[in-house]
Image (spheres, rainbow, N blue to C red):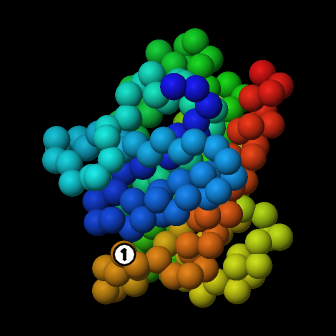
Amino acid sequence: MSGYVLVLYYSRHGAVAALADKIAIGIQQAGAEAMVRCIPPLDNSSTSRHAIVTLAELSGCDGLAFGSPVRFGNMVADAKAFWDGTTSLWLKGELIDKPAGVFTSSGSMHGGNETTLLSMSLPLLHHGMLLTGIPYSEPELHQTSSGGTPYGPSHVSGHHADNKLSVDEQRLAIAFGKRLAGLSRQLKQHR
């Protein structure tokens, strides 16, 4: 398979998966192929509708969107364990100069979305990836009263565990996918 942007995520209750689907739509609207994959769960449970990612799929991507729910202001242990297992790619420099971005979901407005997005960026930086977020040229970033940050798409479910994305959250996720696809295409031409 050639020329795809990988949308890689872990989701337990569905909100991160919903963001992944919207990001994939944005990637496709930009004329690129989106490959949506899940991070393997540590407890061997899987409720995802997408296949588990392989290291070969990660290595072969032109760009990456990486998503995880918030757990105490950080990514889930499953996502951290996945990145801990990518040393072979790091040693070969397989992800160097590929664009990447991050997305997340929390249960409350101040539940740690931004710290989670920033901490999720750390393994990507160690792999030599080029980080991108959402610029303030996106009008929804100015008006959202739920999720959405310049660090990447996000969702706030509130105390009702509602996995339905707001209109602003959907639009920001799609815009992020379009941006990531465009950057992936441009940077691939220079590699």
Residue 167: quarter of image: bottom right
Quarter of image, res 107: bottom left
109 or 92, which lies in front? 92
Q: Is residue 45 left or right of residue 157?
A: left
Up/down of 69 relative to 86, above or below: below
How far across and how far down the image is residue 153, in percent? 59, 64
Report the residue at 58% width, 12% height from top: 92
Q: Position of residue 22 (x, y in %)?
A: 52, 63
Residue at position x 83%, y 70% in the image: 137
Q: How many marks?
A: 1
Q: Is residue 17 above or below residue 58?
A: below
Q: Is residue 12 left or right of residue 32?
A: left
Q: Quadrant of residue 97?
A: top right
Residue positioned 33% across, 65% down in the render:
14
Q: Residue at x 62, y 31 (%)?
A: 3
SS at mark 1?
loop
Could you say which is closer to the camera, residue 141 or residue 86? 141
- Answer whether residue 26 is visible to the viewer in this image: yes
Residue 160: image location, x then y, percent: 31, 86
Foreground pick, 169 / 147: 169
Residue extending furthest toward the top: 92
**Residue 161, placed above or below residue 96:** below
Q: Is residue 75 visible?
A: no
Identify the residue position indicated by label 1 in the image. Answer: 163
> Percent x, y for residue 113?
52, 67
Quadrant assignment for the C terminus: top right
Q: Is residue 43 left or right of residue 40?
A: left
Task: Answer above or below: position of 64 versus 188.
Answer: below
Badge 1 amino acid: Asn
